[in-house]
Amino acid sequence: MNATAISPESRENVTDADVTTIIGLEVHVQLDTQSKLFCSCSTAYGADPNTQTCPVCTGQPGTLPVINETALKLAIKTGLALNCDIERSTKWDRKNYFYPDLPKGYQISQFDKPICGLGHLRISDPKGAFEARDIALERAHLEEDAGKSIHDESGHGGDSKIDLNRTGTPLLEIVTKPDMRSAEEAKAFLTELKLILTYIGVSDCNMQEGSLRCDANVNLHITVDGETVATPIVEVKNLNSFRAAERAINTEAGRQLRKWKKDGLLIGEAPKQTRGWDDAAQKTTPQREKEESADYRYFPDPDLIAVETSGQEIEAIRSTLGDLPADLRSELREQYGLDEYDTEVIVSQGRGVVDFFRRVAKIASTSDGNGDAKKAGKLASNWVGQEVLRYLNENDCSIESYPISAEQLGKLLAKIAAGDFDNSRGKDVLAEMISSGKDLDTVIDKLGIKAVDSSEIDALCQQLIDENPNVVAQLLEGKDKAIGALIGKAKKLNPNVSPGTVKEKIMKMIRR
């Protein structure tokens, strides 16, 4: 079916239910190496312009590239974490194009034999916006970065400048199949990918520093007059955050639908286009027609030999992966009984927070004498997910800088689980431990916290019932909120009593 075969009336009658958004992502990840992909220049961020360059990365005549072995290993490690086929033999190709920040006139990349082949990444949404499923990966290949063009945006016609510090920086380009069907899925993919990359330590994924960059290929499949047609594919660039990617995809999908309703052009009837995302204006703007692979005139790089990797070397790299996020989610649900939301809160914070949580839960379950891992796990999840993460966010620090050890926090939670004092009193203890730097037992003594036995609580509750007949009458009438007044008086008489225990005891006593 072509544009002229679909009437304007048919196009105008298309609704959102007739439209499916098709999304594929291209993600560039800067690998965490100290030197560039083919020379020894530093990859450190923030140096003065053009101070981290050499004849090799600036393409001076007579220079020869030398492969960075660490970059190769990090690429394989990433491929294994993403369930990719690892190529035993891979080669290098020259991708030819001319741009001011590409001093050699070509980029060393990989064309027909990428280091990582087909793979998949599973995504899910704890809020249930879409069903969990695998997103297929087309490939992941190594390439060197280009430099950076710095333009005068003052409007006064100033010069553009070139910084070649990034030239030659090792990148892994991860390409998905057009497998995503919503901007929410694309954001979930990027979030999970970043989490995996940081877990396995191949990149810091800092988007502000350019360590992770993303382009989205977007088009629409539209059901009209009983057939499905597709709009031309558009590559959207300048996506500087995951939220920006989500907004850009939704905006571009809306633009394509409006344009198709107007002109009816389908895939193959208009050239592929590259558009830039303007986050301030919330719109995509045209940049150029999108190149095809033939336009780059790929050919094997004559200065680099093929890379051969043995099965033994691949397995050695696999052994360094450690627990991946998906494995940890299963462990937290099965071993500690956490629900999907609490699991995601812990796992999304990184391996350090997961390990901290594990130690807290273990100490809490063994110290209270009953070894209930799920009870301790839920309690530890609440405290790590709220109190600990609040401190880290407010102080902009990592879990390694948290002032309370996992062992001390675990012992505090064990006392709460044993009924020595309640959560509210426990928070007082934690705050004092942080401010004073004292250990748990010292702080408990300082605050005068003591366990209250059952007979003391019974006597206190009876006293409150006897002295407050009006409140008791309200409770018997079903006005449960009235119990708050009695709990407040109980805390004044004995600050060590548990509000929950007092409430439970009083309600039982007045209903006998």
Image (spheres, grey):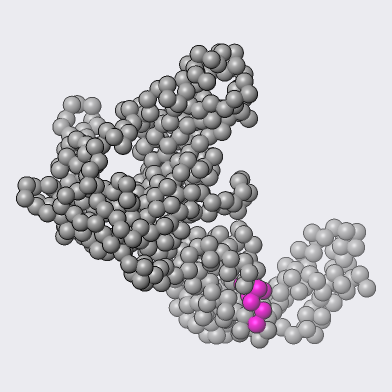
Residue in the image at 19% along x and 26% along y:
156
- What residue sits 21% from the left and 39% below the top? 96
- 98 lies left or right of 284: left
Numbered disc total: 0
Q: Quadrant of residue 201?
A: bottom left
Task: Depth check: give the residue in front, 221 or 86.
Answer: 86
Q: Which residue is drawn at 77% across and 73% down?
A: 502
- Visible in this render: residue 149? no
Farthest residue to the left: give it: 62
In depth, the one of 133 and 191 nearer the eye is 133
Residues in magenta, as a range: 371-377
| Viewport quadrant of the C terminus | bottom right
Q: Is residue 484 visible?
A: yes
The dominant secondary structure in magenta is helix
Residue in view at x 51 percent, y 30 percent: 220
Q: Does the magenta stretch include residue 372?
A: yes
In the image, is 67 to the left or to the right of 86?
Answer: left
Q: Position of residue 118 (x, y in %)?
A: 43, 52
Q: Seen in the image, is 89 located left or right of residue 117? A: left
Residue 167 drawn at (x, y percent): 20, 48
Please say if 265 is above or below 458.
above
Task: Answer whether residue 378 is magenta in the image.
Answer: no
Residue 35 sits above or below residue 179 on the image: below
Residue 147, position in %: x, y? 21, 44
Above or below for 463 versus 301 = below
Q: Position of residue 124 (x, y in %)?
A: 57, 52
